[in-house]
Image (cartoon, rainbow, N blue to C red):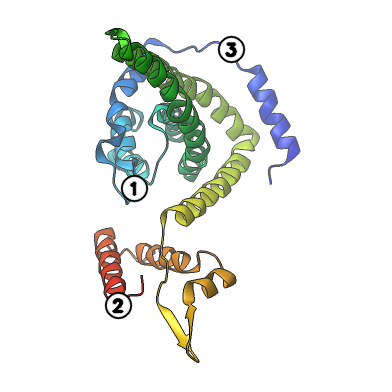
């Protein structure tokens, strides 16, 4: 749990910060570059790291400027290819915050670099929920309603209004999200690191990240045992017994087996092929 005194200290730090988004010419140029590079975030989407490679690609030129030593730059690039997945419009905020933390890591030898991924993972879940609810669940519906309403009357502005209503807020959130993440994030991370609050934030973010990984595993991994067991002429559905013992037990076992194999440095492609073969085998035997 986060200590109340540390939280109070963190709030005092935020109050002392300026309300203006002050960026120098070089930082503004960097944010503009980040804004352009964040658009292909979904271009390398995959089941192993989701948006991780796109995230690292967006930050690549900035990381190269931050780290003068090649080994430090490569380590930072590798660190930012880790698993990442959030609503694309919310990603620039985390990118800006990550850049500010990487900058602090390069300048401060005592900085805990593991906190960078911990904060990323901790933020991606809540921001994904917020972004999906607003952009996909609300704004898109409103934009579509206006666009369809105009189009049904033969007004050529229908599709144009749909694109404007949806994309203008989207683009503003992307750009100023990066500005806010970098500008306020840099000041806050420095102060939080000095006060010791960053360690508590890292711990809380790690816990949140593990909760999100658990929730994603439960919702995305599906395995239902349909094979019946005949006892005394009566058919017993094994899945009902498993659900009474622990709902999602088999998916949990599959996730843990995959996690163990990944920790043993097994190639993810072989794990995916193994899962495909396992699924086909179970289907042939009538287990699934």
Which residue matches tag 2? 285
Which one is closest to the eye, mark 1 or mark 2? 2
- Reading the chain from its start, which is encountered first: label 1 or label 3? 3
Q: Residue at x 54, y 75 (%)?
A: 241
Location of residue 226 with respect to 80 vertically, above or below: below
User: What is the crowding at mark 3: few (fewer than 14 residues within 10 Å), some, or many (at least 20)?
Assistant: few
Front in this rendered view, residue 282 or 274? 282
User: What is the crowding at mark 2: few (fewer than 14 residues within 10 Å), some, or many (at least 20)?
Assistant: few
- Reading the chain from its start, which is encountered first: label 1 or label 2? 1
Disc 3 element: loop
Q: CA distance from mark 1 to mark 3?
A: 36 Å
Disc 1 element: loop
Which residue matches tag 3? 19
Q: CA distance from mark 3 to mark 2?
A: 64 Å
Q: Residue at x 69, y 46 (%)?
A: 1
What is the residue that sits farthest to the bottom in this orientation?
A: 232
User: What is the crowding at mark 1: few (fewer than 14 residues within 10 Å), some, or many (at least 20)?
Assistant: some
Which residue matches tag 1? 49
Q: Answer yes or no: is residue 98 visible.
A: yes
Front in this rendered view, residue 238 or 247? 238
Q: Are marks 1 and 3 in contact (CB under 8 Å)?
A: no
Front in this rendered view, residue 90 or 249? 249
Disc 2 element: helix
Looking at the picture, how far across and down is residue 12, in whole percent?
70, 24
What is the residue that sits farthest to the right in this orientation?
A: 5
Q: CA distance from mark 1 to mark 2?
A: 32 Å
Q: Which quadrant would residue 245 be assigned to in this image?
A: bottom right
Location of residue 55 with respect to 238 vertically, above or below: above
Q: Are marks 1 and 2 in contact (CB under 8 Å)?
A: no
Q: Which mark is residue 287?
A: none
- Reading the chain from its start, which is encountered first: label 3 or label 2? 3
């Amino acid at each position: 749990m986060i200590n109340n005194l540390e939280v109070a200290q963190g709030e005092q730090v935020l109050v002392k910060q300026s309300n203006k988004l002050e960026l120098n010419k070089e930082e503004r140029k960097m944010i503009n570059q980040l804004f352009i590079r964040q658009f292909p975030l979904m271009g390398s989407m995959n089941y192993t790291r989701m948006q991780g490679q796109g995230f690292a690609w967006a930050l690549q030129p900035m990381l190269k400027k931050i780290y003068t030593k090649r080994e430090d730059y490569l380590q930072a690039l590798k660190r930012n290819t880790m698993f990442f997945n959030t609503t694309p419009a919310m990603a620039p905020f985390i990118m800006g915050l990550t850049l500010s933390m990487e900058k602090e890591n390069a300048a401060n030898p005592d900085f805990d670099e593991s906190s960078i991924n911990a904060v990323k993972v901790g933020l991606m879940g809540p921001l994904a929920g917020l972004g999906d609810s607003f952009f996909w669940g609300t704004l898109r519906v409103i934009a579509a309603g206006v666009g369809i309403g105009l189009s049904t009357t033969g007004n050529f502005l229908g599709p144009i209004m749909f694109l404007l209503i949806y994309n203008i807020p989207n683009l503003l959130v992307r750009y100023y999200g990066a500005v806010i993440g970098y500008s306020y994030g840099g000041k806050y991370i420095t102060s939080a690191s000095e006060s010791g609050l960053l360690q508590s934030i890292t711990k809380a973010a790690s816990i949140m990240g593990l909760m999100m990984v658990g929730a994603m595993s439960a919702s995305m991994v599906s395995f239902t045992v349909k094979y019946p067991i005949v006892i005394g002429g009566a058919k017993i559905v094994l899945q009902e017994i498993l659900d009474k013992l622990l709902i999602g037990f088999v998916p949990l076992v599959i996730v843990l087996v995959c996690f163990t194999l990944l920790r043993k440095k097994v190639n993810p492609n072989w794990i995916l092929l193994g899962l495909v073969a396992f699924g086909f085998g179970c289907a042939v035997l009538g287990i699934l």
